[in-house]
Image (cartoon, rainbow, N blue to C red):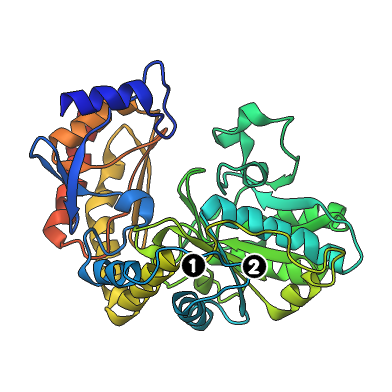
Amino acid sequence: MNSLIELDRQMIWHPYTAMSNPLPCYLVDHAQGVYLYLENGQKLIDGMSSWWSAIHGYNVPELNQAASTQLSKMSHVMFGGITHEPAVQLCQLLVQITPAGLEKIFLADSGSVAVEVALKMAIQYWQGRGEKRTKFATIGRGYHGDTFAAMSVTDPATSMHSMYQGFINQQYFAKPPQIGFGQCWQDSDLASLQTIVEQHHQEIAAIILEPIVQGAGGMRIYHPAYLKGVREICDQYGLLLIADEIATGFGRTGRLFACEHAQISPDILCIGKALTGGYLTQSAVLTTEQVAHTVDQSPAGVFMHGPTFMGNPLACAIALASTRKLLSMNWQQHVLAIESQLKQELLPMLQLKVVADVRVIGAIGVIELMKRVELATIQKQFVEQGVWIRPFGKLIYIMPAYIIRADQLTSLTQAIKTILATL
């Protein structure tokens, strides 16, 4: 085990860590249900769902079977000029369950690539209308991925992307929503975005945002009326609305898609993460027939994007099985039970001096601290408590699999309480 960890340390670059002095890594041997089993025999309750993707937990029989069956046929085939049953069935199901009007689907590789595709789609849409629009409006504290166009619509002031300023396009950032979910709504919360659109709408191709829950930009949860207002602004000025539901899709917020909290449909929808139940990387970009046909009117005559692994049959088969499993289980009851328990067990931590705020929606629990945590130290403490929780910045958050039992969830929240008492 030690030799593998040392080889890893010498050779492998992990997310958001340094090669010269990397953060510690823990060697996982296998995973089952909500547990990660380390090579040393220790088992950890996973509070992260592998960055919010493993909604059914690990080693899921239905998903294993889908993968095995598809592997016996073909693991991959190019999507140019070829199609296959898993892709067709998956797309048919996605059209049925996503917000109304989204009828055309582009299958992509990852969440960041889905955002790239959506932004390119919006630019070509305006070319199809005979206009050159290359700017996007968004809201502060957002996060949309680590590729260059995705970075351009991610708030540079609150993300890891500030060092790339000057290399990426400058976009318009409105003040982030201030009114939280369940608080008293005031239209003035939309004033900053309204002003930007009024002044620059002739050069803006689309507004992009994460519906209801902002992810890695701060884990903030805002009022559905804000999202509804953004839809109205887009309609007023004829702009496209891009909803980035890569983190919020497939039930995480208590609705199948977070847009449903505001009862709106975007013009372009990005989904990923939980799409394959955490088994393989895949994303999808859905749009309306009107947007798709207008893109066709652009000078290229086609949409100019085509990943090598687009429509990968193995990923499509697993995504289809995962989505069918989600729809067949009483997922809302599971998520609402998690939400209720998180509120009961996390909200009292507001009384702790180190805690600035506690936020809960669906199967998402967030504790914002007064100051940043030292990741290597607190990660080790969580492992010693028998849980896998990976904080960032001032935030300690959990997004467990929907199958988690009440006692397992209590183990996660109790570990947080125990460690906060030491800070």
Q: Which mark is residue 174?
A: none
> On the image, which quarter does residue 120 sit in?
bottom right
Quadrant assignment, res 325: bottom left
Position in image of residue 306 (x %, y %): 64, 59
Residue at the spot x=31%, y=23% of the render?
A: 9
Identify residue type, mark 2: Ile
- The x and y percentages for residue 266 are 63, 70
- Residue 263, image quadrant: bottom right
Where residue 85 appears, as percent x and y from the top left, is 46, 80
> Alpha-carbon neighbours of circle 2 within 10 Å: few (<14), some, or many (≥20)?
many
Neighbours of disc 1 within 10 Å: few (<14), some (14-19), many (20+): many
- Figure check: 419 above or below 328: above
* Viewer-proximal residue among 47 and 220: 47
Element at label 1: helix
Residue at which label 2 appears: 268
Say which residue label 1 marks.
258
